[in-house]
């Protein structure tokens, strides 16, 4: 197990760690804003998605991130590209879907691919 995964496990056991403030700006319909922060051993993501809030979108979004959906193949899932997601949050903000979470360092391309797979209606894709 890599050092970053060990530390993410420790962070998970300690409980939520607030590292990113909610996005201050609004998002347009079918657009997104994403901020990510490199925290030495893990990355923190804060994504506001211009899709009307629906709590049934949370589980598929988490599952697609964890299973590597959209990454590296045309299949629905690619476990080789799955992302280890911790401190997962999914909530309504400004009437849209707002997610924030942590991953090991270096997973930005997989995060973008999974979010683009989950929300293909977002103009221009994701840029986390």
Image: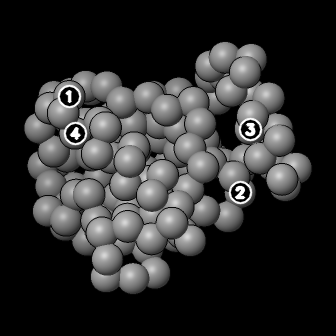
Q: What residue is shown with label 4?
A: 57
Tell me whether the residue at label 1 lies in contact with that at label 2, contact meaning CB atoms closer than 8 angstroms: no
> Exactly how many numbered labels are in the figure?
4
- Residue 45 in the image: state x and y as whole percent: 53, 45
Q: CA distance from mark 3 to mark 4?
A: 25 Å
Q: CA distance from mark 3 to mark 2?
A: 11 Å
Tell me whether the residue at label 1 lies in contact with that at label 3, contact meaning CB atoms closer than 8 angstroms: no
Q: What residue is shown with label 2?
A: 105
SS under mark 2: loop
Residue at 83%, 41% in the rendered image: 6
Q: CA distance from mark 1 to mark 2?
A: 28 Å
Mark 4, Cα crowd under 10 Å, few <14 / some 14-19 / many 20+, is some
Q: Earlier in the sequence, mark 3 or mark 4?
A: 3
| Front one among 81 and 93 | 81
113 shown above or below 101: below
| Front one among 16 and 23 | 16
Horizontal relation, residue 44 to residue 96: left or right = right
Q: What residue is shown with label 3?
A: 8
22 shown above or below 72: above
Which of the labelled discs sits on residue 55, or is there none?
Answer: 1
Residue at 83%, 53% in the rendered image: 1
Residue 83, by quadrant, is bottom right
Horizontal relation, residue 43 to residue 69: left or right = right
Residue 105 visible in the shown view: yes
């Amino acid at each position: 197990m890599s050092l970053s995964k060990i530390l993410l496990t420790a962070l998970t056991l300690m409980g939520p760690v607030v590292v990113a403030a909610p996005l201050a700006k609004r998002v347009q319909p079918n657009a997104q804003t994403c901020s990510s922060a490199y925290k030495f051993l893990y990355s923190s993501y804060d994504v506001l998605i211009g899709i009307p809030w629906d709590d049934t979108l949370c589980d598929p979004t988490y599952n697609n991130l964890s299973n590597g959906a959209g990454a590296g193949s045309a299949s629905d899932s690619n476990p080789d590209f799955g992302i280890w997601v911790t401190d997962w949050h999914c909530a309504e903000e400004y009437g849209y879907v707002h997610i924030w979470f942590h991953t090991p360092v270096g997973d930005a391309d997989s995060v973008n691919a999974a979010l683009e797979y989950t929300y293909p209606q977002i103009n221009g894709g994701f840029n986390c």
